Image (tube, helix red, strand yellow):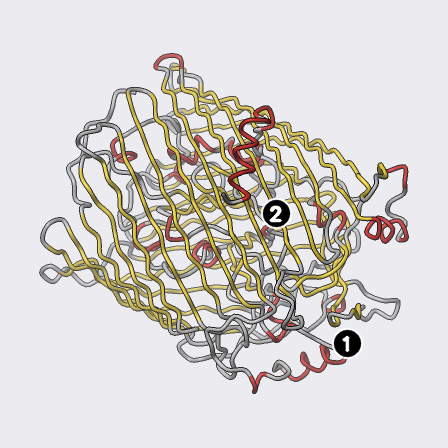
Amino acid sequence: MPPWLLYLLLSLLAAPAAWAADGDDDDSAGDEHDGDDDDPWHDDDSAHGVAEAVEIHAHRDEDHDTHARQTIEGAQLERTRGQDLAEAAAQVPGVVAARGSGDSTKPIIRGQQERRLLVIYDGVRHESQKWGADHATEIDPFSAGKISVIKGPAGVRYGPDAIGGVVLVEPPKLRTEPGVGGSIQFVGVSQGWRGVGAARIDVAPAAAPGLTLRVEGNYARGAALRTPDYVLGNTASEVWNAGATVHYRRGGLHLDVSYRHYDFRAGVCFCVKNSTPDDFEEQIAAGTPNGADLWRQSFNINRAYQDVTHDTVASHLHAFLGRAGALHVTYAFQHNDRQEFEQTRRAIQRSQFRFLLRTHSAVVEYHHPAASLPRGGLTGSVGVSGTFQENVYRGVPLVPSHRAVTVGVHAWERLTLPRLELEVGGRYDHHGRHSFLSEGAFDRHEARGLLDEDDCEPGDETTRCGRSFDGGSASVGVLLHAVPDLLEIKLDLSGATRFPNGDELYMNGSAPTWPVYALGDPTLGTETTWGGSPTLGLRLSWLEAQVSAHVSVINGYIQFAPELGDDGQPRFDVTIRGTFPRFRYSAINALFYGIDGGLTIAPGAPVSLVVQGAVVRADNLETGRPLLFIPADRVEARLQGRPPALGALSDLLIEVQAEYVARVRHADERADLAPAPPATFLLGAAVGGTIALPGDQSLSVGLEGRNLTRARYREYTSLLRYYADEPGLEVRLRVRFDFGHHLPRRNPPDA
């Protein structure tokens, strides 16, 4: 029996009171599950009929969200198959995918890194070791039927940590009409000679009304990535996913139980290893990694590498109570097992770093019945949530193990009038954590003057250091339909709180996927942000546009930046494992502001133009200097042609893409390890279409190319920029076969 499964069974038997859920997590669960509209419990036919990824719904969640929110679905989402979650989310203006030291990326929203973002899959907050620059989000992008990005503080609905935004990932809707449907998909990528195969099948047995079953899985393998001039040695990867869902519906009760497994293995680029500080400086000056001429493109994964598995068991219970409202209950268990392997003697087979993260989460949310007013209606909910989490670390000294509990309560109300929607909400969360430091780790922090024996409880082998935090959030949102169906104005005023992570408090060391020497600060407190974001939406027959401005002040912002010596030069730590630039965590007050958005000229016409872009700035309010690692200004244009259908061939698309990324001039280069990379211009193209086949079947084919000019460039927010260029030319071929997906609509159920 797998250790994580044994742990789950014991926990279910021995500690039911600890089934707490992340407050962040799932107060949104009901909202994400059925759409964050006026009535998230409204159950229409589109929500439970058969819906494929290529379907674009007329009703969109962001139309009723006072936050700046955009959704990727339908054909736009389909084009991202073969990419990871961060690359898919980067289709939204204001979102950037930052590469680590291998074949993985992490999302950045409006300059906020992943530790200030929430990723919620199917109503459950994703829990993982997300502090590392090379720790990709362990969610299968093929399992997404819709990805919604909420930009800006969203603490009331989604809980602590939602300072920068939320990425909501929803699976494709389950079928309820009797029958069988699904899809089979293949993706081939020239970059890294990558091949991907995926399949999903849904079954609704006619003999068991109300029952739906889903099974899905995929496998991908790729060789080392290649820049225009050289191979990024040891960046091969292998990933597979599997999942199953059981849905049962009877009357006003809906029950979903699902299990998902994620398995990822990837090398760490040889380029991030340095023997001395001079090696690091010489590599930056040369513009080419040391030894790059010796690396060859291979599917082999050598040391150093990472091996990660993530298992999730989740259940949702919806109870529609008629005139009494509705109740939603979610419970989830997640088991994240991360192992990292250093370069060692061949006789050593074990990992040098192992992180086991086990998380129980639950939420109970009650939606009161809609109240009718003379000119509108009132909807809202109240909920309680909590999390019990255990992090066990074994290996080279780096971070301590810990146990943590988070509990939260929240409430929100929404007033809907003919041309105005007003939402107010509030939230309170408490977080308690006990960290278990080894004697050496405690002594190192004590020597820095950041811990003493009065702060902790000495034990036989470890010292237990306890911290507790409290945080509150509030929000006011306004949606004005200034000219119905033509012009709308949103204003979001929100606050959110983030509790410091264990690595920010106690980290002392480096790891293969974290090739810097990082120093935590046990005295750090909470981050609290207050911000505002006005959004303007315009819809004309010849123009659609959405533009958002944003500004937020973060008190106690935990900055992670290079540590400089008295001479203003970066400091390095030389260890038996190599030489690493020293980074440290410190608390400052920060100001973030910017603008992002996009427009479409001639939407729906045979030829249209899509333009989108983003500008973001961030300053240290104490020194007036700009912060590091804030994304560069960027603008993207896509000229799209949609020829008319040719017999059975439909959904034709011909597209030319151009992206310009400016050189970062708003950073304090005196505090950085290397100058910001120069401006970049990338050219791409795409073509695709769908062929209707007999028997409710279809075949979709797409071909897309990126960086067709083979331009050399580096992404400012990526760890890789200190060592090497970004991957070069990429051509991606997608082939998808769908079956059993054209079924008659049902009448809306009585709920």
Q: Residues within 10 Å of mark 2 (few under 14, many from 20)?
A: many
Q: Residue at x 76, y 80 (%)?
A: 278
Q: Residue at x 31, y 38 (%)?
A: 59
Please name which of the two marks, 1 or 2, marks the residue nearer to the observer: 2
Q: Residue at x 89, y 49 (%)?
A: 446
Q: Residue at x 85, y 67 (%)?
A: 565
Determine which residue is flagged by label 2.
Answer: 356
From the viewer's perspective, tell me whether residue 187 is left or right of residue 478: left
x and y, in percent, of residue 160 in the image: 61, 37
Which kind of residue does numbered mark 2 sit on?
Leu
Describe the element under mark 1 as helix, strand or loop: helix
x and y, in percent, of residue 305 in the image: 58, 65
Determine which residue is flagged by label 1.
Answer: 277
Q: Residue 683: in sight, yes or no?
A: no
Image quarter (top left, top right, bottom left or bottom right) of the C terminus: top left
Which kind of residue does numbered mark 1 sit on?
Pro
